[in-house]
Amino acid sequence: MKIALDAMGGDLAPRSPVLGTLQFLQDQTSGMEVILVGDKTILIEELGGSTPKGIRIHHTTQVVTMHEQGSKAIKTKPDSSIVQGINLVKDGLADAFVSAGHTGAIIATSLLSLGCIEGLRRPALAAHIPTATGGKIICDVGANPDARPEHMLQFAIMAAIYFDHVEGKSNPKIGLVNIGSEPSKGSELYQETHKLLKKELPNDFIGNVEGRHLLDSPADILICDGFVGNTILKFGESWVSLFIGQLNKQIMNKRSYQMVARMLQPVFTNLKKLYDYEEFGGVPLLGVNEVVIVSHGNSSPKAVKNSLLAAKKCITENLLGDIQHGIIEHMVVVN
Amino acid sequence: MKIALDAMGGDLAPRSPVLGTLQFLQDQTSGMEVILVGDKTILIEELGGSTPKGIRIHHTTQVVTMHEQGSKAIKTKPDSSIVQGINLVKDGLADAFVSAGHTGAIIATSLLSLGCIEGLRRPALAAHIPTATGGKIICDVGANPDARPEHMLQFAIMAAIYFDHVEGKSNPKIGLVNIGSEPSKGSELYQETHKLLKKELPNDFIGNVEGRHLLDSPADILICDGFVGNTILKFGESWVSLFIGQLNKQIMNKRSYQMVARMLQPVFTNLKKLYDYEEFGGVPLLGVNEVVIVSHGNSSPKAVKNSLLAAKKCITENLLGDIQHGIIEHMVVVN
């Protein structure tokens, strides 16, 4: 198996991709290869002068920066790590692409180079949100700021198959993010989507999930458009650190608190870990014709390692083929 | 001054409205009257047999339940506490209406009975979100699950005036909730709204605010459609109690943690209070032709008291008149 990794993408590149790759390869058998896509000189230096077994470098000269328009990357930066990495997959030289780089560029280039699964026009990002009882998938979290009910049905089908493959729970329960529990609640988009999900996925759809129950509802999958999903995901990410920051600030106010708090350190560490989005590596871009994993912009080596593991799992579990079947089963004309 | 209070609305009615009224009146001068709108027999019993000074009862026989369609309340429940309470304001017998009842019914009845401020067609709910540095206003949080750019501009104008009047900070900074900082980010609605806010409010609009910065951005006002706002608000509300629940659970796991945690109790209590949405009472329905305050469904007596205080402040600070001027100043043809 070969995984192409954008070694120039993300705030901590190239160090994080390189270290994450080394960590990932430690536990892999000899058939596994990671192709680091990026500037050869920089990467060899980062690797300490030579390329270890299991690593190959695919030299590129350009990088898509965060201020560029992602949709134009394929034209303006043809020799970037994103465009070249996706090309490796397209040409059958890699089985998956992983990147912590410009999300818009990854999505646009994937769409143009790899295309969508038949019957599907809108890929979607399915993120893991940690909860007290394990975790949920929320989809879409940013690929489709504007979506239609038919798209959202397809998000649900794809996310359910992904959840089944990656979290190992079959027949996951699907909920629709909404501002009330009744089917008539929400915007037109959500009212129509509710009807469609009820009709097409009667056994799995459990109805609307309000904001206050996003983390404790029985739904394994939360469906929404990319604007709502991205906002929820990022808001949730910010909460934990803000809250722990506040806690720390209050504790530092008093010497007696400080001493006591030290004894509770394991509790705080556990909590932080429980809600640590970095633990969960990348987010799959569901619906494109190959395995593409989008990682958090400030991915740590551990997050990169977990993203590589996610890519591997998608390949070995035949995620693509199963999504293809799922989409055909509920074929809806999508524009 | 007379404030009509829905004494039958909310999960904790009539006890919460009655107790909240008594608490509110304790600090008021003699000119203040609260009209409890609801079943006379029930309310007199709740009041202990008689109506104290400053309280009057307006007898009604119906209640709008949470399962009814709010838009039909004015026809199906003409003698409900919501419809009658709003009528008191319409007829000049009260200066404001406060309710923790069915939000949809309050909005629909207000629109039909009281109408909108001239030039404005869409009222909006402006909620306070507590943050480490005081608080922000997020608008809209549910009145408009579907909105247009012109509506969102008006939300911004109204919310800024409300912030000025209630939080006492003039020229508040306005941010647009979005999934990226660049103007080109987000759905069509948010791209267009960005342009409009930049054009119409060049001195106050500071650009997009991503989900991860909702609580720590420099924006005092966060503008969004009612679907996004409601989801954010409710998600935020749920976070604190979920997180504290997790903290408790971990602490209860070990006897030594329990003893230590007891000493940190003041810290936890402070934190809970800092993020306590109940502290902030009601949410004004901005844009209707009178002062209407929508309270949280499970409002405590303190929340009711704070809602009554908010209503009083809106009246004394001439919120309505100033919003009227603000809207005329930026008159945009709105459908």
Image (cartoon, coloured by chain):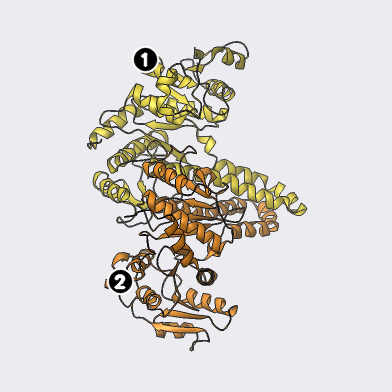
Chain colours: A yellow, B orange
Judged by depth in the image, the label closer to the viewer, 1 or 2, is 2
Q: Residues within 10 Å of mark 2 (few under 14, many from 20)?
A: many
Is residue A261 depicted above or below A296 in this figure? below
Q: Which residue is mark 2?
A: B74
| Residue occupying image coordinates x 43% and y 28% | A70
Question: Whole-Å distance between the Cαs marked 1 and 2?
Answer: 65 Å
CB within 8 Å, label 1 to label 2 = no
Q: Is residue B312 left or right of residue B68?
A: right
Q: Check the image and name the residue furthest to the right.
A: A255
Q: Which mark is residue A91?
A: 1
Which SS class for mark 2?
helix
| Residue occupying image coordinates x 61% and y 17% | A46
- Percent across and percent down for residue A242 are 59, 47
Circle 2 chain: B
| Residue occupying image coordinates x 27% and y 40% | A150
Q: Residues within 10 Å of mark 1 (few under 14, many from 20)?
A: few
Q: Is residue A264 left or right of residue A140?
A: right
Circle 1 chain: A
Callout 2, which amino acid? Ile
Q: Check the image and name the residue furthest to the bottom.
A: B50
- Percent across and percent down for residue B242 are 52, 53
Is residue B219 depicted above or below A313 in this figure? below
Is residue B276 depicted above or below A74 in this figure? below
Question: Residue A293 sits in which quadrant?
Answer: top left
- Quarter of the picture holding the C terminus of chain B: bottom left
Callout 1, which amino acid? Asp
Q: Work out whether residue B298 can be spotted.
A: no
Q: Work out whether residue B280 can be spotted.
A: yes
Q: Check the image and name the residue furthest to the top.
A: A50
Which SS class for mark 1?
loop
- Percent across and percent down for residue B264 are 68, 56
Q: Nearer the viewer, residue A309 or B323?
A: B323
